[in-house]
Image (cartoon, rainbow, N blue to C red):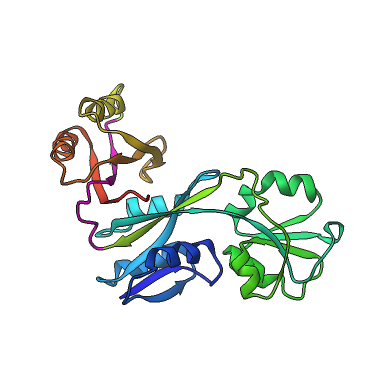
Amino acid sequence: MNIYYLGPKGTFSEQALLTYIKGKEGYCVEEVKTIPDIIMRISNNIGDEALVPIENSIEGSVNVTLDMLINDAEGLKIKDEIVLPISHCLIADKMIDFNDIKSIISHPQALAQCRKYIKDNFPQANIINSDSTAKAVAEIKHKYDAAAIGNARAAEIYDAKIIDKDIQDIKNNFTRFIVLAHKDSMYTGYDKTSLVFSVPNEPGSLYRILEVFANENINMTKIESRPSRRKIGEYVFWVDIEGHRCDNHIIKVLNVLNGKTDFLKILGSYPKYK
């Protein structure tokens, strides 16, 4: 079985992947360059799996993941989740003084999670986006006025030096990753379900949907709106709820939602990460 992840080696995605497959056999790991490429790859390969980031506790949702699962990933289900603590490091090719750093390179999410740190320490630095934190570390090789933001494993892989540790603006920083497959997870008794829906554009329509969950005492752990891509001002809603789609009270709610929504898509049920 192939499992695809956002490469190259040394990304936080790789760390989450190693956590997920630890103690499991039969996985062939394959790096992919972008999240859309990952999702298209898994869509065309039944039996394989993929791991992608979906939200960060500081910067919020990874919109490309949400939008592709809502609009483009027919037949895919969420079968598991991994929550990874994120510790960013300032990394250079050689030990370097802060005053000599003219450019800082990283993935946009990492740069955003370290925004205040960068402003306080490098207000004049040129900020450069990279496809991943690991690629950023690779890009500073033989550059003696540049630093990257990445993790300690990336520094080790690319033989670089850690200049500073735990530089994220909020120390309690976590990223949630999801595992995609063509089937979701069996009932465990400690599950959650992800779904998306749209409602009629009329007063009270969203309230009436939320009331359905409240009436069945179902806890919502996430709700977020995303543009429908059809016209301006029209949205779909992503919701995570506690419970498995096979639970009787979840089945009841989903049956009610079918009659109250314009569009309803069940993205899968899976164990809550412990």
Q: Residue furthest top?
A: 203
On screen, 88 above or below 226?
Answer: below
User: Is residue 6 shown left or right of residue 167?
Assistant: left
Query: On the rendered image, what quadrant is the N terminus found in?
Result: bottom left
User: Is residue 94 shown left or right of residue 200?
Assistant: right
**Residue visible at 46% across and 61% down?**
16
Q: Nearer the viewer, residue 183 or 228?
A: 183
Magenta span has 184?
yes
**Residue visible at 34% across and 54% down?**
69
User: Is residue 92 shown left or right of residue 245?
Assistant: right
**Residue visible at 30% across and 66% down?**
43
Magenta span has 35?
no
Percent x, y of residue 118: 73, 49
Percent x, y of residue 187: 20, 51
On screen, 174 above or below 164?
Answer: above
Task: Tell me the quarter of the picture where residue 162 sits.
Answer: bottom right
Percent x, y of residue 214: 26, 26
**Residue visible at 54% across and 65% down?**
11
Residues in magenta, as a range: 182-200
